Amino acid sequence: MSNPEMSGQQGEDHRYLSVSFGGEQNGSAHRRSISPASSARTIVEENDDLDGGKPQFKRRTTAVVDVDVTWWDLLKGLFFGPSTVRQKLSATVTTARLEEPEEDVFYRKPNPFIQHVIVYPRRGSNVAQRHEAQCTLDTANLQGNIISAKFAKGLGFATYEPLRESEEVGGTGLNGQIHNVVGAVLVSWCHHTSTQVYRNMRFLVSETANVDLVIGSHSIVKYRLLSPPNFCTSKDGKKIIDFKIAEKNQATKNRDKLSASKEKAQELVDNTEAERTRKQRRNAWSEDDEKRLERAKKKHKLAELKLELHDTKNLPAKDQPKAKQDLQRQINELKAELDEADKGLNNPSSAISSPRL
């Protein structure tokens, strides 16, 4: 299907297609045309026959039953049984009619995926009246637009255009129905609530379609027949969230977290070294204190390696595997050394006190 064109002026007669295929078409046998019109294209025009009517239906009414029973009647029924008040109830029942609400209160929009559209007959045929058709907007149909063979015949189509190679494969719709197509036709149609007429839209003739028309996903997107899904919007409903930006933001958060861990480890090293200076002045620096300093330095180195591992994605693709492998090996070795050091600190018998002078 080619690109649509918006036209402010309608053609001579919108009841007929502007492009005909072949010569005189009659008879019930399906024949394919020899040379389809090469200039045929879908044209979107304004529709003057706008009908914005609502569906006609009768709403069920509601009534209220009013019973005039006194407390004395209820008391007698309690002591002497319900038979004493049954006659009283029957005699005082009245029905109060409620004011019927406006029809607009109960009006609901139809299913957006199932529409009733007006279809123009084939130009040059003996069909003069437009046809109303049930149209399904099938977002899962990638084969193309579908028209039932019976409905196409009613529009005056007796011969079809040959199928393209991609159309001959067949396809399955959203409901699982398989469409076996035998040819193609160009159909003009419009919706009674829209001002646009879609002229010369390509439809594949299917002998198995259970609805008059099926609009496939390509035409739905191309002509914006449905609003796009709005799953990823900002709180105000205007800005579309970009998944790539979201992933980038998450990667930035991860790096900030690793960078903060590195700074925290560096702060621990600085504080421990400052403590060593103070204790050495008093000759109070012990072997355990030295182990704590070494452990703090290893933690800082570990945080530094993790940050470098995160940043390897910025390296050329060919260098990333080797760099990741080398950094991961160093990280594993440092973790093993830290685990061994923690065991020594948690075991008092293994601690050796340095001699004090």
Image (cartoon, rainbow, N blue to C red):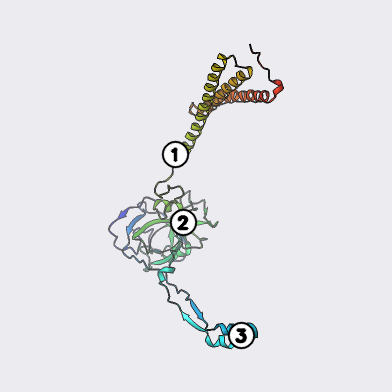
Q: CA distance from mark 3 to mark 2?
A: 83 Å
Q: Which mark is residue 270?
A: none
Residue 98, visible in the rendered structure: yes
N-term mark: 1 or 2: 2
Q: Which residue is mark 3?
A: 76
Which label sits in the foreground, 1 or 2? 1
Amino acid residing under circle 3: Lys
Q: Nearer the viewer, residue 22 or 79?
A: 79
- Residue 34: x %, y % from top left: 42, 55
Judge whether 80 appears above or below 340 on screen.
Answer: below
- Residue 268: x %, y % from top left: 54, 24
Judge whether 161 appears above or below 127 on screen.
Answer: above
Amino acid residing under circle 2: Gly
CB atoms at circles 3 and 2 under 8 Å apart?
A: no
Q: CA distance from mark 1 to mark 2?
A: 46 Å
Q: Which mark is residue 183?
A: 2
Q: Residue at x 55, y 20 (%)?
A: 275
Q: Which mark is residue 245?
A: 1
Q: Residues within 10 Å of mark 3 (few under 14, many from 20)?
A: some
